Amino acid sequence: MAEKSVTPRRQRLGQVLRTLREATGKTGSQSADELGWSAAKVSRIETALTLPSEDDITTLIDHYGGDEATLREALNLRHAATQKGWWEKYSDSLDQGYLAFIGLEAEATEMRNWEPMVFPGLLQTAAYARSLVGNTIHPKIPPAFVRDRVEVRSRRQQLLLHGDKPLRFKAIFDESVLKREIGGSEVMLEQLRHVLDLASLPHVEIRINALNTPVPAPWGSFVHLRFSDFPDIVYLEDPDGGRFWSDPERAFSYESSFEELADAALDGSASRRLIEETIAQWRA
């Protein structure tokens, strides 16, 4: 079963406290008994399912013999974990799993995205996203919700690909995406030109699975997120909402699948040439 997502800062805080406990040689149950807490409380704090209070953090670090610098780090992590992200104002119009995903990608250093049917969200123009969300994926949602979803995609792209510390983004999608009409020919031409522009960025790699290559493994779309100081997370999306996997074995299986898809796909130069050829076809 897929896991609920927790924020990176909460995960990091849990890791700091668990590492301190393990350095003492104590189990979670032993520490809980000595503090007069339940073992479940210690476990939930260390697995980031519970955000500890400042007093709890101070108590734990004092109990484990941590120094003042460690206490400051932990309190700073807790403070950061309580800060609201820009995406939270869209909580009425977006799926909660998707909102959690936006919070996770904001902390990621690298994103790998496989999309067999449409352009990845970080590559979509506003017109393409509007047509896709309003007419194809969610044809019956209120216009205001469509507007919010398009606005969020545009802002994600601006922050993650054009910000001061851009994300390393690797995308693979099927050649059929280039030819599947979403919104009409003008929308498609704008979209294809936009993808070409993004492909020129040094931190963006775009690869296309050509139609004349073997059919890829039957993977639906997925996003593999990498972080600087805690384990990878995989995000999946379906009609029921967003789901996450973070156990190492499962995350590694998706990492391996992405590598297999990349090996079968066209390289960056050939992918760009194919996009240019498809632009000429849409103009005709």
Image: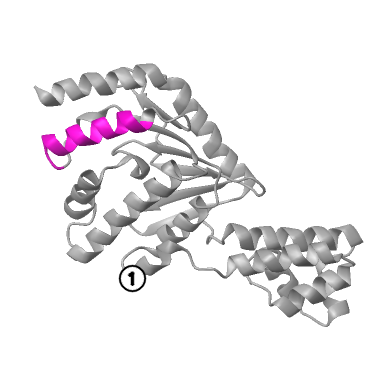
Q: How many marks?
A: 1
In the picture shown, does residue 206 fall above or below 106? above
Three-letter amino acid code of the residue under disc 1: Asp
Q: Which residue has dot 1 on it? A: 92
Pick out the residue farthest to the bottom: 36
Say which element carries label 1. loop
Mark 1 packing: few (<14 Cα in 10 Å), some, or many (20+)? few
**Residue 264, magenta (yes or no):** no
Secondary structure mostly taken by the magenta-highlighted segment of the chain: helix
Left or right: 207 in relation to 31: left
> Between 112 and 37, which is closer to the camera in this rendering?
112
Residue 126 % position (x, y): 24, 47
Part of the protein shown in magenta: 183-198
Left or right: 239 in relation to 282: right
Residue plotted at (56% across, 38% down): 253
Residue 264 % position (x, y): 43, 21
Residue 89 % position (x, y): 38, 68
Left or right: 220 in relation to 128: right
Residue plotted at (62% across, 60% down): 9
Residue 216 visible in the shown view: no
Residue 182 visible in the shown view: yes
> Between 35 and 278, which is closer to the camera in this rendering?
278
Residue plotted at (67% across, 58% down): 12
